[in-house]
Image (tube, grey):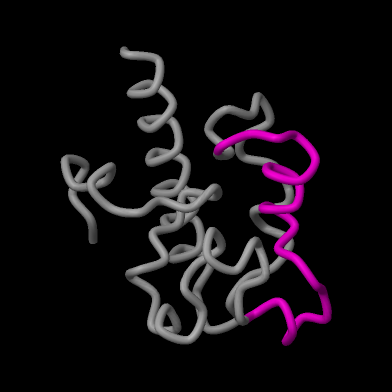
Amino acid sequence: MVSPSDIMDQSTEVCGTICTECDYFSRCGGCGAVQGRPFWTASVGIEECPIYECCVGERHLDHCGECPELVCERFTRFRDPDVTDEEAAAALETMKTRLLRKKREEQGL
């Protein structure tokens, strides 16, 4: 698990995920590199991650921490079936924490 002090030292994607921690990073490169089309979109039959599409494509935000709807249903629409409910909830909370911290830092707070 990433410590709070290390959160902003790593590449946090628009959703709060640190893609370099993913086992598939070498295959994908993260949403920034593939413009919201990570490896998993093909397996669920979509072209673009709905979080990336909303944040970057529709709302023109740098990350979801700038959105008043954080955390919205897009964060739970697709989920790794190998992850328990508890693990998914913890991961979502970590993502939210990263994004809100990023927003505060950008505002100089």
Is residue 44 toward the left or the right of residue 65 in the image?
Answer: right
Give the dominant element type of the magenta stretch: helix, strand or loop. Answer: helix
Q: Nearer the viewer, residue 5 or 86?
A: 5
In the shown orientation, is residue 11 left or right of residue 41? left
Residue 64, image x and y in percent?
A: 58, 38
Residue 41: x %, y % from top left: 71, 77
Check the image and report above or below for 62 versus 95: above
Residue at screen point 61% across, 73% down: 38
The verdict on residue 54 being magenta is: yes
Residue at 23 percent of width and 56 percent of height:
2
State left or right for residue 14 relative to residue 2. right
Q: Quadrant of the N terminus?
A: bottom left
Say which of 51 and 74 sits in front: 51
Residue 17 in the image, given as x and y percentages of width and height: 45, 57
Quarter holding the C terminus is: top left
Q: Is residue 85 above or below residue 7?
A: below
Residue at 64% in and 80% down: 40
Q: Which residues are magenta?
A: 40-62
Q: Is residue 102 above or below residue 49?
A: above
Report the label total: 0
Give whichever of 79, 63 is nearer the camera: 63
Kindly indicate the quadrant of the structure image that contains residue 58: top right
- Asked if residue 11 is positioned above or below residue 4 in the image, the reply reads below
Q: Is residue 43 left or right of residue 34?
A: right
Residue 58 belongs to magenta span: yes
Q: Picture coordinates of residue 72 (x, y %)? A: 69, 42
